[in-house]
Image (tube, helix red, strand yellow):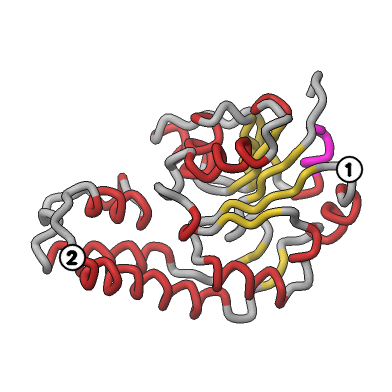
């Protein structure tokens, strides 16, 4: 990059950690629950959605009681807890973070719950590298909304969006990043899917340590 980079925003699942969360099953169960309660119709094209966009769509109906919302989130939490058990680091993560420590602002923005995210990062002994962790309870809207990224820019209000880079594996990471004006690197992402969803990464990397080439 031909500019000064001051901070990096990381996705967590399948970027820092190789999780075993069954996102497809989580999405299907969440949708089945919401459609059974009459919150969502049964004709939604699931292949065009993630769990977070399904939930966002449901919340926008304003037809959900607090009890229904709690039941909905229990589905996601169940899958997160199961999927994050014994989750291992992606190759090269510790080496990368060690080389960046003290030189850049390092932040994690994840759609996971704070509890699941903190536990996974602590279990893998990398929590100490990060200045901030933003989980779903802290966001008004989940990725692909840029809300979590905009919160980071608000915390570090002496920096510009162009002084940040984000890295993630999914189109929702790229959508959130670019809408916040932050350069996005795809880490082993499905580029065809990203392009279909209107996301065009600034670069693609296969090894997380390749991030260093862009800062």
Q: Residue at x 22, y 73 (%)?
A: 67
The residue nearer to you, when weighing 9 against 209, is 9
Where does residue 132 sit, x and y in percent of width and height?
68, 54
Q: Is residue 5 magenta?
A: no
Q: Residue at x 84, y 52 (%)?
A: 96
Where does residue 111 sit, x and y in percent of width and height?
49, 57
Q: Residue at x 11, y 67 (%)?
A: 37
Q: How many marks?
A: 2
| Residue 103, disc | 1
Classified by dominant secondary structure, the portion drawn in magenta counts as helix
Badge nearest the viewer, 2 or 1 = 2
Q: Residue at x 62, y 42 (%)?
A: 152
| Residue 65, disc | 2
The residue nearer to you, when weighing 29 against 104, is 104
Mark pair 2, 1: CA separation: 46 Å
Relative height, residue 67 to residue 205 (above, below): below
Relative height, residue 190 to residue 133 (above, below): above
Relative height, residue 46 to residue 177 (above, below): below
Which of disc 1 and disc 2 is earlier in sequence?
A: 2
| Magenta range | 210-215
Secondary element under disc 1, as helix, strand or loop, is loop
């Amino acid at each position: 990059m031909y500019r000064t980079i001051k901070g990096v925003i990381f996705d967590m699942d399948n970027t820092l950690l190789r999780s075993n969360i069954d996102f497809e099953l989580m999405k299907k169960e969440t949708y089945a629950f919401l459609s059974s309660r009459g919150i969502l119709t049964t004709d939604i094209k699931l292949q065009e959605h993630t769990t977070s966009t399904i939930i966002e769509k449901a919340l926008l109906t304003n037809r959900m009681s607090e009890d229904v919302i709690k039941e909905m989130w229990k589905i996601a939490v169940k899958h997160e807890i199961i999927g994050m058990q014994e989750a291992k680091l992606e190759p090269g993560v510790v080496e990368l973070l060690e080389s960046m420590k003290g030189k850049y602002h390092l932040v994690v923005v994840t759609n996971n719950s704070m509890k699941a995210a903190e536990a996974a990062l602590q279990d893998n002994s990398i929590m100490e590298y990060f200045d901030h962790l933003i989980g779903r309870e802290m966001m008004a809207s989940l990725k692909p909304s840029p809300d979590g990224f905009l919160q980071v820019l608000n915390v570090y209000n002496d920096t510009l969006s162009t002084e940040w880079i984000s890295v993630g594996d999914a189109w929702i990471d790229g959508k959130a990043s670019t809408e916040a004006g932050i350069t996005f690197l795809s880490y082993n992402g499905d580029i065809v899917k990203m392009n279909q969803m209107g996301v065009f990464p600034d670069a693609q990397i296969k090894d997380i340590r390749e991030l260093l080439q862009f800062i």
